[in-house]
């Protein structure tokens, strides 16, 4: 299950729907609007293996790696969020739901830096051609 932070622009959510990428939105489908960052984590625990996408860098904390969910910080311009969500979902390293839980990822123009459970050092992945 994909969960989008309420800070993703509505136009980007429309693009994802156009591409038939299903998701839920904080403040609309999940939790209350304006829920504090720390209070979102317990909510993610109760969802079925969610991957949470946000434009908020505060979620890029390796200590928040958890086996029941994934966190992905989109370190890109707001108007590029949908494109990079789609690219991330198609990336061979993250192409299945099982590969996306238990990570904290930083998604950037030049690639992805991510932490997995039980590993202290980050790994990197480049965008495929």
Image: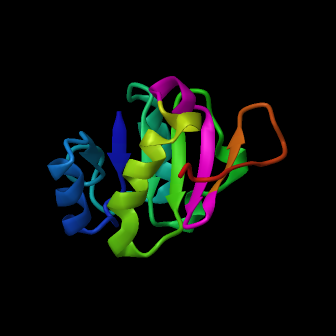
Q: Taking 129 as reference, is 94 above or below it?
A: above
Residue 21 image point, x, y percent: 25, 42
Place of residue 91 in the rendered image (x, y in percent of width and height, measured from the top left):
51, 41
Q: Quadrant of residue 81?
A: bottom left
Q: How many marks can you see?
A: 0
The residue shown at (65%, 45%) is: 64
The residue lying at 45 percent from left, 66 percent from top is: 55
- Which color scheme is applied? rainbow
Farthest-out residue, right? 120
Q: Is residue 52 left or right of residue 111?
A: left
Magenta stretch contains residue 110: yes
| The stretch drawn in magenta includes residue 67 | no
Q: Quadrant of residue 82?
A: bottom left
Q: Read off the magenta span.
A: 96-111
**Nearest the camera: 44 or 76?**
76
Residue 106 percent across, percent down from the top left? 60, 57
Please give the name of the residue rendered at 62% of the width and 39% of the height, measured from the top-left corner.
Answer: 103
Location of the N terminus by quadrant is: top left
Vertical arrangement, residue 59 with respect to residue 121, above or below: below
User: Is 77 above or below relative to 120?
Assistant: below
Measured from the top left, where is residue 101 in percent x and y? 54, 31
């Amino acid at each position: 299950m994909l969960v989008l932070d309420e800070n993703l622009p509505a136009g980007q959510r429309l693009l994802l729907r156009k591409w038939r990428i299903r998701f839920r939105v904080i403040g609309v489908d999940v939790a209350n609007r304006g829920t504090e960052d720390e209070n979102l984590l317990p909510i993610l625990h109760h969802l079925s293996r969610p991957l949470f996408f946000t434009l908020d860098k505060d979620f890029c904390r390796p200590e928040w790696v958890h086996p029941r969910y994934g966190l992905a910080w989109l370190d890109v311009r707001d108007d590029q969020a949908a494109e990079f969500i789609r690219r991330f979902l198609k990336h061979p390293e993250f192409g299945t739901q099982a590969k996306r839980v238990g990570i904290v990822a930083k998604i950037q123009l030049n690639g992805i830096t991510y932490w997995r459970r039980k590993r202290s050092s980050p790994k990197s992945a480049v965008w495929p051609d």
